């Protein structure tokens, strides 16, 4: 079951941009464009796994909405143009899980969201993609119910691609996310492992090479 | 910094006072000394004259005493004289010269008959020196009336002697030399000079002290002024000096106070405008962040994510809309800044309300039609002396706002009456607590509604600046749910 994300953001363009990306990444989204509406909406339906909250909202601002959301035990990430320390402290000490300042990159938002979700045990350990079933906890991959052996690094790489499915991830970022920041290696390493994944899992058509951007797992 | 200034201050403290005192004392001392010199010279001249007179008088007295005395006979008698001198100072005086030396004592005592024999003052060497000297310098006539007497001065052993030569005896072959001690003339003069010098020194010191006290009082305000000026340099602008002196210093204090007023006013206005600018830039950054975030976010999504055709189109649509918004923002900002800086030149002209309203109508047609709003213009041929383009802009901004505040199928009234133009709508209205803010840049009563209809939050700020240029008073009255009326009170009546 996909995670449900509530976006409270008064700028239509930004709200829709986030929603568009989250949808592609496999989330289900709902948008409220003003604080008061969000407040009323939350009373009726609060089965969200995460709230992306703007601070400056018409009707009721993000800081006042925070305790309302907290009472439903939904983790909150602030997403705002206010980048002064006071606001950041107020947001984070007020109970928000994270504080992201606009302008932000989608990739960063996705990673941070995932961290918050896993911290709050909102992520399921089994991810189903195409004909694959990936069990994060057991470190196993099944293709059409048949277990396939992957080396640890190949498994980590697959995990990142699956979590960012339909989104292109650059070789540098993959290197960083899979092998770690300290890893001193060439992007060739990534290419080799991608080749292994394509071969072992039969994903030659699904793991696309995007010129200048990197790789993308397409569903 | 502060320490350095304090040091500088103590170093120069009282310097001006000391300079004035020094110069004054020098001038006084100099004048007094010149006076002293004159007084001393006059005294000396008088004392010398008196001394000479008394010396001559003494000689006469001596002579008359001699004549009444038996000594005189002795003196008159060449031989006895010679005998007398031979007896006492035979080696010293040559009687052939027919000279008689009579030396008066220090007190000028003329007990000559009894003592003349005992007054041998000169040694042989001295007498010979004296002789020589006497021979060389005779001929100075003592005075005209007593041309029988001649005198000369002789200095010996630190004392001044006057030697008076007088011819006595019937045949004139006996000369009397009377030596008078005149040292007292110099001594008296010296005493007087010393006294005068002491007096001069005393007067100078007294004057110096008086000047110190007086100048300290007179110049004290300068320290106060200097302190205040230093305080001002350290950014304390509310200090004023309290000096009520009616002189140049008082005037300086007054000027200083008015300067301080001007500076503090200027600083205040600078600070205000600086604050305003900071606020403006803060809001501007915020206003720009949203469209920039949207544009870069959609672009990133388009580049990296596999999207459906529908989503792709939506993303592009948003990118376009947000860039238009940025462009609008930059245009409005340019307008605002150009008005703020006053760099543009304006030509004022008479224009009828009808013409103004026509241009407003023309510019707002699109917006009016999109919400199906009726713009009602009321005027009676009023004329206004204004810069037509700016006032049109002002009215367009007001009508734009009215359109944004109106519900669909609403009505807006644009009305000219006397010196007043008003724009009324019957829309959402503005809450009381927000009315005072709505002329500020980027202030929006309902941001999402404003953005939806293309507002960037600068229209009323531009309107305010235009109004300021024209001395127009803007008044806003509003009731939530009933509508808003903006009134422009024109100061200048049309020059008919």
Image (cartoon, grey):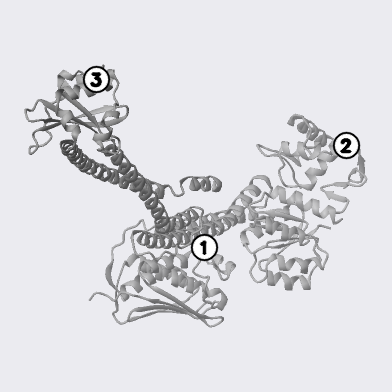
**What's the distance in space between the residues labelled 2 and 1, CA to CA?**
53 Å
The tag on residue B456 is: 1
The tag on residue B300 is: none
Which residue is depicted at the point 48% across and 75% down? B372
The chain letter for the residue carrying disc 3 is: B
Viewer-nearest residue: B359 or B91: B91
Label 2 crowd bin: few (<14), some (14–19), many (20+), radius 10 Å: few
Residue A12 coordinates in the image, percent (x, y): 62, 62
Viewer-nearest residue: A25 or B245: B245
Disc 2 target residue: A152
Q: Is residue B16 above or below residue B64?
A: below
The chain letter for the residue carrying disc 2 is: A
**What's the distance in space between the residues labelled 1 and 3, CA to CA?**
141 Å
Q: Nearer the viewer, mark 1 or mark 3?
A: 3
Q: Is residue B443 left or right of residue B417?
A: right
Q: Is residue B94 above or below residue B223?
A: above
Viewer-nearest residue: B330 or B468: B468
Which residue is depicted at the point 15% across and 18% down? B96
- Element type at mark 2: helix
Give whichever of discs 1 and 3 has the lower sequence position: 3
Q: Is residue B136 above or below residue B415?
A: above
Q: Is residue A155 left or right of residue B181?
A: right
Q: Is residue B181 visible to the viewer in this orientation of the structure? A: no
Q: Nearer the viewer, mark 2 or mark 1?
A: 1
Disc 3 target residue: B86
């Amino acid at each position: 079951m996909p995670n449900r994300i509530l976006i409270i953001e008064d700028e239509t363009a930004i709200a829709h941009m986030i929603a568009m990306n989250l949808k592609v990444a496999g989330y289900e989204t709902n948008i409220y464009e003003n604080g008061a509406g969000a407040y009323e909406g939350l009373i009726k339906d609060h089965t969200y796994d995460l709230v992306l909250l703007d601070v400056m909202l018409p009707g009721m601002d993000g800081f006042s909405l925070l305790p309302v959301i907290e009472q439903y035990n939904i983790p909150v990430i602030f997403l705002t143009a206010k980048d002064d320390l006071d606001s950041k402290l107020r947001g984070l000490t007020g109970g928000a899980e994270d504080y992201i300042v606009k302008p932000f990159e989608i990739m960063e938002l996705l990673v941070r969201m995932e961290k918050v979700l896993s911290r709050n045990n909102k992520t399921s350990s089994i991810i189903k993609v195409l004909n694959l079933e990936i069990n994060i906890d057991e470190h196993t991959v099944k293709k059409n119910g048949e277990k396939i052996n992957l080396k640890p690094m190949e498994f980590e790489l697959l995990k990142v691609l699956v979590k960012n499915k339909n989104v292109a991830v650059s070789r540098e970022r993959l290197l960083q996310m899979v092998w770690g920041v300290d890893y001193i290696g060439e992007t060739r390493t990534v290419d080799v492992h991608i080749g292994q994944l394509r071969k072992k899992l039969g994903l030659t058509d699904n793991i696309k090479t995007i010129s200048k951007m990197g790789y993308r797992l397409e569903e | 910094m502060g320490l350095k200034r304090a040091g500088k201050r103590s170093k120069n403290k009282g310097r001006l006072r000391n300079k004035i005192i020094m110069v004054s004392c020098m001038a006084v001392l100099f004048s007094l000394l010149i006076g002293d010199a004159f007084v001393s010279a006059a005294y000396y001249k008088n004392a010398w004259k008196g001394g000479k007179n008394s010396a001559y008088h003494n000689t006469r007295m001596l002579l008359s005493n001699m004549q009444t005395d038996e000594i005189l006979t002795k003196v008159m008698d060449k031989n006895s004289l010679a005998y007398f001198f031979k007896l006492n100072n035979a080696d010293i005086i040559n009687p052939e010269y027919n000279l008689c030396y009579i030396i008066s004592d220090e007190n000028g005592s003329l007990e000559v008959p009894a003592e003349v024999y005992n007054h041998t003052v000169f040694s042989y060497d001295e007498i010979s020196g004296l002789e020589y000297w006497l021979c060389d310098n005779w001929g100075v006539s003592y005075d005209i009336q007593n041309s029988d007497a001649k005198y000369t001065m002789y200095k010996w052993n630190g004392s001044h002697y006057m030697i008076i030569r007088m011819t006595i005896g019937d045949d004139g072959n006996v000369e009397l030399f009377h030596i008078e001690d005149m040292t007292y003339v110099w001594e008296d003069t010296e005493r007087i000079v010393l006294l005068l010098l002491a007096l001069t020194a005393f007067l100078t010191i007294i004057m110096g002290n008086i000047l110190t006290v007086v100048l300290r009082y007179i110049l004290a305000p300068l320290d106060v002024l200097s302190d205040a000026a230093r305080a001002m340099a350290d950014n304390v602008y509310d200090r004023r000096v309290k000096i009520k002196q009616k002189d140049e210093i008082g005037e300086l204090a007054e000027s200083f106070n008015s300067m301080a007023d001007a500076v503090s006013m200027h600083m205040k206005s600078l600070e205000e405008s600086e604050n305003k600018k900071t606020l403006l830039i803060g809001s501007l950054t915020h206003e720009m962040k949203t469209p920039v975030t949207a544009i870069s976010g959609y672009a990133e999504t388009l580049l990296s994510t596999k999207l459906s055709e529908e989503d792709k189109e939506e993303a592009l649509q948003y990118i376009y809309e947000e860039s238009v918004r940025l462009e609008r923002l930059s245009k409005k900002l340019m307008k605002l800044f150009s008005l703020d800086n006053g760099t543009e030149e304006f030509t004022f002209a008479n224009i009828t309300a009808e013409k103004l309203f026509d241009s407003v109508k023309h510019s707002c047609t699109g917006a009016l039609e999109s919400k199906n709003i009726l713009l009602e213009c009321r005027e009676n041929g009023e004329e206004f002396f204004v810069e037509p383009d700016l006032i049109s802009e002002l009215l367009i901004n007001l009508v734009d706002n009215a359109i944004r505040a109106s519900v669909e199928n609403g009505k807006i009234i644009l009305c000219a009456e006397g010196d007043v133009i008003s724009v009324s709508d019957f829309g959402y209205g503005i809450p009381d607590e927000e009315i005072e803010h709505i002329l500020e840049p980027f202030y929006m009563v309902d941001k999402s509604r404003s953005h939806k209809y293309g507002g960037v939050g600068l229209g009323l700020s531009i309107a305010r600046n235009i109004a300021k240029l024209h001395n127009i008073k803007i008044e806003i009255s509003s009731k939530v749910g009933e509508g808003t009326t903006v009134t422009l009170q024109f100061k200048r009546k049309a020059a008919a």
